Amino acid sequence: GDLRMMSSTTSGIVVIVKYYYRLLKYGIKIKDIYQICKYLCSFVTKNFKKMNNLNYLRGSIVAIVTPFTENGTVDFEAYAKLVKFHLENGTNAIVVAGTTGESAALSEEEYASLIRFTVEKVNGEIPVIVGSGCNVTSKAIRHSLVAKREGADGLLVINPYYNKPTEEGIFQHYKAIAENVDLPIILYNVPGRTGSNMKASLTLRIAREIKN
């Protein structure tokens, strides 16, 4: 359904461009043509997002910071300004509660509230990806379920840190998360922080055997 709508909308844009001068001849103003094209492009973008498919993800994907007030609570007013800045300046996706987003400093309630707030502010304009990794598999699953509940489009999941699992252990970690949460997962390999490395062969195995 979404693909058919997008196909029709794209065709509409092509028709407008093709008959641009004829539209002018019939008295339709340039600014009106621009507004129509802008609306149709916005419609296509939002319907790509509705498909919940990160295959189209590319460009500038920003791991957004989480500002705090002087008393240590999340500064949602400052955070809203950051989100607005990225929406207005061509950022293609936002990563919430990653390492840059101070995920380790967030309470469970703050974590859920931050995701919900971001999804509401973004309002379908760009994908919202949530850092949900943890060195405890059950906790990573719990975080991932919260992210899905609050409207995330995808997950950024780091290798289990400190524990230094085997390759099979890393595979089983991602497999368990994928089986419990039906969202696209982006693998996050940072050996310097986790103490373990995801080899190319393991990455390929995960891509082949785990659907999301």
Image (cartoon, rainbow, N blue to C red):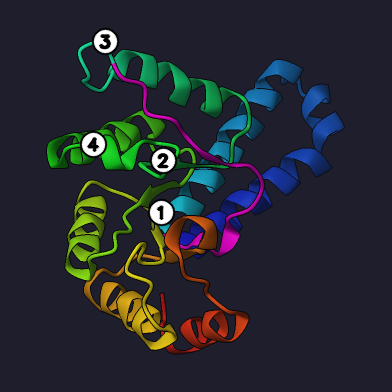
Of pointers 1 and 3, the one earlier in the residue sequence: 1
| Residue at 53% over, 28% down | 87
Q: CA distance from mark 4 to mark 2?
A: 24 Å
Q: Position of residue 166 (x, y in %)?
A: 40, 83
The count of marks equals 4
Whether residue 192 is in magenta: the answer is no
Of pointers 1 and 4, the one earlier in the residue sequence: 1
Other-residue count near label 2 (Cα within 10 Å), few / some / many at <14 / 14–19 / ≥20 = some
| Image: 105 above or below 193 | above
Q: The residue under label 3 is which amino acid type?
A: Glu
| Residue at 38% over, 72% down | 164
Of pointers 1 and 2, the one earlier in the residue sequence: 1
- What is the number of the mark on residue 70? 3
Contact (CB < 8 A) between labels 1 and 2?
Answer: yes
Is residue 29 in sight in this rendering?
no
Q: CA distance from mark 1 to mark 4?
A: 28 Å
Residue tagged 2 = 124
Other-residue count near label 4 (Cα within 10 Å), few / some / many at <14 / 14–19 / ≥20 = some
Q: The residue under label 1 is which amino acid type?
A: Lys
Q: The residue under label 2 is which amino acid type?
A: Gly
Residue 165 as seen in the image, left or right of residue 138: right
Q: The residue under label 4 is which amino acid type?
A: Leu
Residue tagged 1 = 50
| Residue at 40% over, 45% down | 98
Residue tagged 4 = 106
Q: Secondary structure at mark 4?
A: loop
Viewer-side residue, 113 vs 161 = 161
Image quadrant where one finds the C terminus: bottom left
